[in-house]
């Protein structure tokens, strides 16, 4: 029996049977929507982030909830793929990408390649609320943050610096990809009024070329919110999402009538069918989606580890049967 107050992580079962190599993994489906406000976020680290978001939504705005939920992940020094403690680029600098979207006014803010700022999600929000622009990059984004009273911080930890030195000695060999060294927090929210919100934040691909920008800060790729239909967010190899406007595609699938899980799966299949070079298991892309009526789900292709996401409302998850509905796919794919 699931405790209604318990925070439930929706994940694929480790013991699940391998599915067809042409099928992305459908990680969860809801048959019964959660109460509003509700939040859905990528990966196990989405769990404490959603926890905080629900708490903040109880006393603040949904944008506060998304922003402060994501703060939890950005401030987690042990998380090597988001915020402080993130894996640096090939020059040893931590460069962060983030964006935020507000459904009711279809507004957005974004930063890419920003350095020395602990909470890029907050800078993205400032871009949205305090400027006439949508996206700021690099040094300009950092200077804007400072002008808004956000202090500069050292983001490269001693541990990541050491690993970067090793990586250089090791002929720049790409690190094994696992749950500890990649990924994005993408968070979607739905409030009592039926309005949708979203945000995402990442340090991107470890040891990337300086200046590389992934899908996460690109509206329609790493995140998309359409207040009439639903919201979607992405994690995985940004290059394989941003060439296809992945999150926009998921939302369009929902507009066409697909439920969130099916929409994510259909988007992955569409991307795989259009990519001439990569099979579905080489794409390493994962989506979460939340519909206007409160259904949520996800699907992805990540191999060698499990794509999972978290969802919660004030009282916990209502439908524990959403767990592990579909099997995990074959192991062993690589990021391309
Ligand atoms: N999508 C992110 C990027 O490509 C990284 C990830 O989610 O694994 O920058």
Image: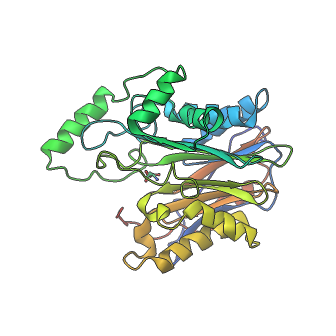
Q: Residue at x 57, y 53 (%)?
A: 219
Toward the viewer: 321 or 231?
A: 231
Residue 291 falls in which quadrant of the image?
Answer: bottom right
The x, y position of residue 326, in whole percent, is 62, 68
Residue 154 falls in which quadrant of the image?
Answer: top left
Left or right position of 226 against 244 = right
Residue 46 falls in which quadrant of the image?
Answer: top right
Residue 1 visible in the displayed image = no
The x, y position of residue 207, in whole percent, is 29, 46
The residue furthest front is 132
Residue 278 visible in the displayed image = yes
What colour scheme governs how the chains and residues are painted in the rendered image of this protein? rainbow
Toward the viewer: 301 or 237?
A: 237
Q: Is residue 152 above or below residue 162?
A: above
The residue furthest right is 193
Left or right position of 53 against 275 = right
Q: Residue at x 55, y 63 (%)?
A: 246
Q: Which residue is drawn at 30% across and 42% down?
A: 89
Left or right position of 1 against 247 = right
Toward the viewer: 259 or 116?
A: 116
The x, y position of residue 137, in whole percent, is 44, 41
Q: In this view, does 297 lie above or below 59?
A: below
Left or right position of 313 against 327 = right
**Quadrant of image for the C terminus:** bottom left
Q: Which residue is drawn at 20% across and 52% down?
A: 173
């Amino acid at each position: 029996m699931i405790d209604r107050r318990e925070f439930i992580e929706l994940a694929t079962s480790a013991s699940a049977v391998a599915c067809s190599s042409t099928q992305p993994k459908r990680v969860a489906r809801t048959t019964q929507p959660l109460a509003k406000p509700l939040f859905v976020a990528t990966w196990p680290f989405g769990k404490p982030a959603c926890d905080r978001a629900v708490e903040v939504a109880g006393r603040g705005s949904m944008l506060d909830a998304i922003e402060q939920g994501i703060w939890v992940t950005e401030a987690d020094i042990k998380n090597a793929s988001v915020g402080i403690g993130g894996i640096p680029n090939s020059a040893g600098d931590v460069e962060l990408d983030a964006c935020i979207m507000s459904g009711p006014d279809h507004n957005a803010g974004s930063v890419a390649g920003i350095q020395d700022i602990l909470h890029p999600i907050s800078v993205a929000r400032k871009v949205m609320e305090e400027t006439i622009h949508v996206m700021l990059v690099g040094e300009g984004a950092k200077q804007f943050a400072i002008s808004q009273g956000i202090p500069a911080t050292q983001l490269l930890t001693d541990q990541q610096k050491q690993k970067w030195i090793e990586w250089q000695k090791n002929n720049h060999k790409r690190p094994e990809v696992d749950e500890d060294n990649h990924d994005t927090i993408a968070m979607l929210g739905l409030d009592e009024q039926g309005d949708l919100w979203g945000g995402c934040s990442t340090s991107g691909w470890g040891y990337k070329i300086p200046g590389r920008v992934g899908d996460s800060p690109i509206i329609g790729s790493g995140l998309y919110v359409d207040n009439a239909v639903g919201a979607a967010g992405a994690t995985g190899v940004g290059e394989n999402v941003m060439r296809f406007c992945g999150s926009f595609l998921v939302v369009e699938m929902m507009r066409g009538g697909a439920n969130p899980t099916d929409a994510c799966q259909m988007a992955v299949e569409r991307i795989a069918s259009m990519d001439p070079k990569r099979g579905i298991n080489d794409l390493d892309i994962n989506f979460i989606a939340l519909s206007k009526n409160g259904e949520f789900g996800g699907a992805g292709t990540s191999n060698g580890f499990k794509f999972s996401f978290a969802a919660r409302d004030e009282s916990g998850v209502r439908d524990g049967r959403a767990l592990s509905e579909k099997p995990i796919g074959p192991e062993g794919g690589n990021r391309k």
